Image (cartoon, helix red, strand yellow):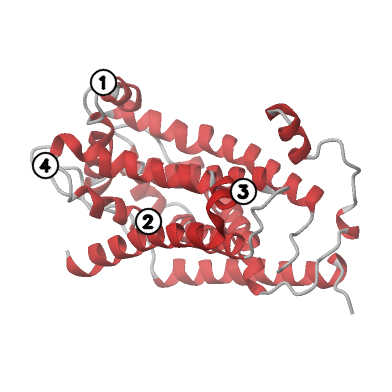
């Protein structure tokens, strides 16, 4: 079986469609099976609160710090929405970790679900990058220096480090260019990739069903 | 009796979604976000990352300045690679050995996080 055949088989594009209400639920599943759903709930809360934050946040060197202050002091429920964004991000990462451990222990990554496992690992990776890029956006002391230290690590890679650093920072220093770049990654690139990967993740669950507990 | 998606499972999903929302709301009220200090460009400052990056921060301590990419990039990417290939690794070395390797990486994460939280 070559790679394309394997991919098409695991992705189950051709199998028959089943209505969501007719799906079978295997017997003997426990409450650890909830953490995927909890992670998705936290993701949706991140998305919605993030959409509202983006109405008020200004990703520029001069305005970023001031706009965070405005969100806290002037925007109606602004501080609460920022709190929801922060805490749903934390809940998201914890529940993804528990979800991965559950999938590993119940051996649900085994064929025919190995492609779904890979998609899940990539989702986890992108969520971690969301955390890294989002950390710079408040443009305060911690955010700035954490990004300087974090991107310095990338710069220390032999041969390609310097070019990578220039791509990520948009220059030799962490400046407003870096801020604009991280903002773009945080609110456009990564959420778009996540949306596509999550669709694939749920598509495969729908086609393959929930794995039977051992 | 066998559980059906509708209504048994759907009720449970909605229940847990609402509880998740409530927990997040509670955390947001109890521990509201704070505004950090303004950036001081004049002197370098050693910041601490979010808790989910603390284990990498801990790994960095074992490498000199020009080798930090091993702790910060190579080891994390190796772990991601290990996770991606688990379905095939397990086929060759068996579930128990794979679980042992996974536990080893999880312990790196756990020990690194705990050391950074409590001893630094």
The answer, for residue A40, to whether it is visible in the render is yes
Q: Viewed as shown, does residue A138 lie left or right of B4?
A: left
SS label for mark 3: helix
**Which quadrant, please, contains the C terminus of chain A?**
bottom right
Q: Is residue B81 left or right of residue A212?
A: left
> Which of the two residues, A4 or A93, is positioned nearer the viewer here?
A4
- The chain that hosts pointer 2 is B
- Residues under numbered marks 2 and 4 in contact, where contact means CB atoms less than 8 Å apart: no
Q: Is residue A51 left or right of residue B60?
A: right
Residue A167 picture quarter: top left
Q: Quadrant of residue A146?
A: top left
Residue tagged 1: A159
In 3D space, how far apart are the residues under numbered discs 3 and 1 (Cα atoms)? 33 Å
Counting residues from the N terminus, which is met first, the one under dot 2 or under dot 4?
Answer: 4
State which chain disc 4 sits on: B
Residue A49, placed above or below residue A150: below
Q: Which residue is mark 2?
A: B52
Q: How many residues crowd mark 3 within 10 Å: few (<14), some (14–19), many (20+)?
A: many
- Residue name at image x 58 percent, y 58 percent: A39
For the residues labelled 4 and 1, the Cα–Cα distance comes to 26 Å
Question: In the rendered structure, the residue with mark 3 lies on which chain?
Answer: A
Viewer-proximal residue among A23 and B7: A23
Q: Are marks 3 and 2 on the same chain?
A: no
User: Which element carries disc 1, helix, strand or loop?
Assistant: loop
Instruction: Tell me the quarter of the picture where residue A67 sits.
Output: top left
Residue for badge 3: A117
């Amino acid at each position: 079986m070559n790679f394309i055949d394997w991919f098409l088989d695991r992705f189950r594009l051709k199998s028959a469609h089943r209505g969501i209400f007719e799906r079978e639920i295997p017997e003997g599943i426990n409450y650890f099976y909830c953490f995927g759903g909890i992670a998705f709930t936290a993701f949706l809360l991140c998305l919605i609160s993030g959409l509202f934050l983006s109405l008020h946040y200004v990703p520029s060197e001069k305005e970023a710090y001031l706009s965070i202050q405005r969100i806290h002091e002037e925007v109606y429920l602004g501080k609460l929405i920022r709190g929801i964004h922060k805490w749903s991000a934390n809940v998201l990462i914890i529940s993804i970790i528990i979800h991965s451990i559950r999938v590993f222990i119940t051996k649900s990554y085994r064929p025919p679900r190995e492609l779904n496992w890979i998609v899940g690992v990539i989702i986890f990776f992108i969520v971690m990058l969301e955390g890294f890029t989002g950390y710079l956006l408040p443009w305060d002391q911690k955010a700035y220096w954490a990004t300087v230290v974090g991107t310095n690590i990338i710069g220390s890679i032999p041969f390609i480090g310097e070019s990578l650093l220039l791509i990520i920072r948009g220059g030799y220093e962490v400046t407003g260019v870096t801020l604009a770049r991280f903002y773009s990654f945080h609110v456009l690139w990564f959420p778009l990739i996540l949306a596509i990967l999550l669709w694939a993740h749920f598509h495969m669950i729908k086609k393959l069903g929930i794995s039977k507990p051992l | 009796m066998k559980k059906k998606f509708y209504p048994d499972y759907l009720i449970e999903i909605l229940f847990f979604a609402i509880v998740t929302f409530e927990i997040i709301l509670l955390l947001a009220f109890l521990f509201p976000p704070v505004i950090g200090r303004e950036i001081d460009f004049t002197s370098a400052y050693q910041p601490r990352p979010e808790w989910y990056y603390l284990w990498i921060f801990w790994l960095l301590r074992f490498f000199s300045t020009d080798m930090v990419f091993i702790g910060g990039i190579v080891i994390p990417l190796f772990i991601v690679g290990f996770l991606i290939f688990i379905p095939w690794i397990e086929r060759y070395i068996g579930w128990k050995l794979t679980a042992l390797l996974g536990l080893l990486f999880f312990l790196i994460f756990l020990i690194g996080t705990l050391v950074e939280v409590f001893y630094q």
